[in-house]
Image: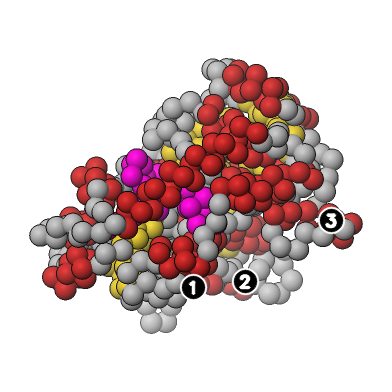
Amino acid sequence: MKWPKHDLAQFIIQLCKVKGLKHVVISPGSRNAPLTIGFTNQNFFRCYSVVDERSAGFFALGIAQQTSEPVAVVCTSGSALLNYYPAVAEAYYSGLPLVVISADRPQHLINIGDGQTIIQPHAFGKHVLFEANLKPPTKTLFNSTQFARDKAQKLINKALDTASRMMGPVHINVPFEEPLYDTVPEPLSLNISFKKDIKTAYFYLSPSFQKTWQNAKRKLVLVGVNPPNSLDSAVIDQLANDPSVIVLTETTSNLHHSNFFPFIDQLIAPLNEEGYEALQPDLLLTFGGLIISKKIKAFLRAYNPKHHWHVDPYKANDTYFCLNKHFKINPNDFFRQLFKNTPSNKSSYFDFWNRVKLQRKKAHNEYLKSMPFSDFKAFELISHAIPQNFVVQSGNSSAIRYLQLFEFHPSISLYCNRGTSGIDGSTSTAVGASIVSKEPTLLITGDLSFFYDINGLWNKYIPSNFRIIVINNSGGGIFRILPGNDNSELFETYFETKHNRNAKALATDFGFAYSSANSEQTLALTLAEFFKSSSSPKLLEIFTPSSQNDKILLSYFDQIA
């Protein structure tokens, strides 16, 4: 078995193996040859070659998203590293364990005009949880070579532990001298002691918090991005059956109960001041990742609860400017203690808003019956057509917002890059997720997002059960919904970004079976075939009328009021 001759590469590879880091996404280069040789010669690792580093970063995020385990990305020196930044930022805000391993030039070659060199240490600033800037393990006036090797091993080990325990991105920067391709039959032995797993500290919930919970007659539980099956059924039932509690969820919450409120914008958009005051909670309890709905953010910022508690083992965002308690614990453990000896409070909070929910749902269904073909109608048909047990990956902007207006079978899990909410890596993330998912994957994305991240399809790992639906409304349709639309040439050019592109040639080039639809009838027929088994992945492009989509959506909220 071949090992790279470079000590630092040997240490990185051995420690990744010891820590159980299995997935390694490698982009081509020469300076990272010691790492590439080491990882690809070990059967333990599952290695992927992805040329575009920006795409590779999101590809790795998709794997981390599905496995909840650290995933490494490996690149050469120079600007290659900077292309990881969008994925690093997404990992930081989404809480995903991304391990960036960048090859670098020796220090004496930096900033002297040598090729492929930039200042790589601290490249990601505060968007990484830990940074290991390694140095060649050489003897110095004060320390031996072995001392330098031990120090490097400790830094690598800490980086890997941080990614795993704190669930976020880390950066390991490693300089290599030439020659880069030399190998040895055996690596140097590790000289590091591994601490036993740190047991979770005992959590004690003060009776005063239980009393506050019990006394609150209006409790609003707001759930952000959440992996499926993360909350125990007993906890779900207790929240759902408490008359003083309403639970607001989003599609990315992956949390289901008939008593929950999955359509936040549908509930809130028509409210007047009296309605806002009736909804204002005494206690707001949040858990999960970031929230999509701008309407719930605006409401809670204007109508602050008396208490805002956030439950998360790692971090809490003061999204509504009223956070006064962060419980650093898993939500299941928190609720088990919260519910001890705290009977339900008498309240009409749930009953009142449940009646409103049912009224909104009735108005929603009535509007759909008369709605013309549009983005909205396309999403309605798609939501009914997705088979059970699918993993749905959504693009950002309008795609994820339309998905908030429809209900999905509990067996369908839904994901979106909501850490930074950018359009830049949706396709790459979906592809990465699809190769480790046990279930088939569907990406639903807008046209700009799809064309922006087309390199997400530039790899050989896409499974035949992968599906893409592109909503092509000839530009950034969300800008017609947002304030500022004036239908001028300037608006169409610089905001909406009008175009005449379609995905047919790209689909063919990347080996996808292509189909298209431009009406309710053709879409219904196409969807009937789209999810059937095939020997290649499929792409469905839906063309919708760009000038009508915003009017249809905005009139929807008027209709349900």
The local crowd at label 3, few if under 14, some if 14 to 19, many if 20 or more residues have their Cα within 10 Å, is few
Please check the rendered image and state whether residue 257 is part of the magenta-colored stretch, yes or no. Answer: yes
* Quadrant placement of the N terminus: top left
Could you tell me how far apart the alpha carbons at marks 2 and 3 are, in whole angstroms? 45 Å
Residue at numbered disc 3: 487
Q: Residue at x 42, y 82 (%)?
A: 141
Q: Residue at x 33, y 44 (%)?
A: 259
Amino acid identity at mark 1: Ala
Residue at numbered disc 2: 119
SS assignment at label 1: helix
Residue at numbered disc 1: 302
Q: Position of residue 326 (x, y in %)?
A: 31, 70
Residue 354 visible, this orientation: yes
Q: Position of residue 34 (x, y in %)?
A: 52, 51
Q: Residue at x 60, y 36 (%)?
A: 368
Residue 31 visible, this orientation: no
Range shown magenta: 244-269
